[in-house]
Image (spheres, coloured by chain):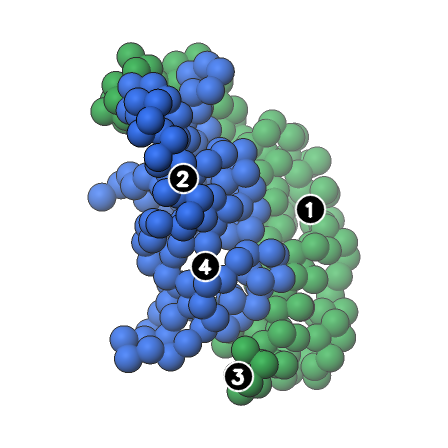
Chain colours: A blue, B green
Amino acid sequence: MNHVSIFVLDQDSAYDFYVNKLGFKVHTDASMGPGMRWLTVCPPEQPELEISLMAIAEGMMFKKDAAQQMRSLVSQGTFGFGVFECNDLVATYEELKAKGVEFKKEPTKEFYGFEALFKDDSGNWFSLGEKQK
Amino acid sequence: MASFPKIYLYRRIVHAKLFIDDHYCQPINLDDIADEAFFSKFHFIRLFKTTYGKTPHQYLIAVRIEQARLLLQKGAPVTVACYSVGFDSVTSFSALFKKIVSLSPSAYRQGELKRAAEMLEVPLKFIPNCFAQENGWV
């Protein structure tokens, strides 16, 4: 797989979150005109995986009601879009907290591993685990 | 987290890393960074490497090269990128850049400027067709 999508409420704010807080790299930032922006980022060690920060807007993909529903669902934190892993969960947790990232769950030893849960600026949540040492 | 064993050590190492992130362009050295973390130099290097997989010096170089990469991407001349991020020799900067990025700074800069120009002229070349169609951009 080389592209995945995360629906965001605002692409500028999402850019700041994923690039400046999470440390992702910008892969493509192309404009097709006002309100039509193709923005993809990639985790620093996975340059081949493009994560599209997809705006929720009325148009071909979403009718008006669907766009409003989707925005409401995203802002309520309905969606968990994936799992990230890092070298050291406690250090990463402390750093992200210092940068203002909101956590739903602090690092906790679960039966399946050591995990924290954080939210992006839109409300989407992600699991953050630690690489096996 | 207050109850997590040795959380105070983590916070000091993270503080040192963030110090490097904020001061990379200045002539900092390991003693400065170790002092920021209230560690002895040897203990600091060992803990930093265990946490981040790089020594503090290696991490500082990586941050400088990454910041230089971003400047070159925007078209900054090689010498400007070099000195702006804290290197004091273009020769050693270029060698380190090539080792990490696999391209010389000037080749990287040219490639990125060309890519940026293409993205402005033909943005559809960079967007998967299915997404472009779903969004009504074609």
Q: How far apart are the two marked residues, 4 and 3, measured between alpha carbons?
A: 18 Å
Residue B135 seen: no
Q: Amino acid at mark 1?
A: Val
- Label placed on residue B85: 1
Residue placed most toward the observer, A116 or A104:
A104
Q: Mark 3, chain letter?
A: B
- Label placed on residue A118: 4
Q: Mark 2, chain letter?
A: A
**Contact, CB < 8 Å: mark 2 with mark 4?**
no
Snapshot quadrant of residue A116? bottom left
- Residue for point 65% across, 30% down: B77
In the rendered view of the protein, which quadrant contains the C terminus of chain A? bottom left
Q: Position of residue B120 (x, y in %)?
A: 47, 16
Residue placed most toward the observer, B73 or B122:
B122
Q: Nearer the viewer, mark 2 or mark 4?
A: 2
Please state if B69 lies on the left or on the right of B12 as rendered: left
- Does B110 appear above or below A52? above
Please state if B97 lies on the left or on the right of B121 as rendered: right
Q: Nearer the viewer, mark 3 or mark 1?
A: 3
- Label placed on residue A40: none
Instruction: Determine whether the residue tagged by mark 3 lies in a helix, strand or loop.
Output: loop
Residue placed most toward the observer, A76 or B9:
A76
Q: Nearer the viewer, mark 2 or mark 3?
A: 2
Sort mark 2 into few (<14), some (14-19) or many (20+) by Cα contacts within 10 Å: few
- Residue for point 72% across, 43% down: B83
- Residue for point 54% across, 78% down: B1
Q: Which residue is mark 3?
A: B4
Q: Amino acid at mark 2?
A: Ser
Sort mark 4 into few (<14), some (14-19) or many (20+) by Cα contacts within 10 Å: many
Sort mark 3 into few (<14), some (14-19) or many (20+) by Cα contacts within 10 Å: few
Q: Which residue is mark 2?
A: A72
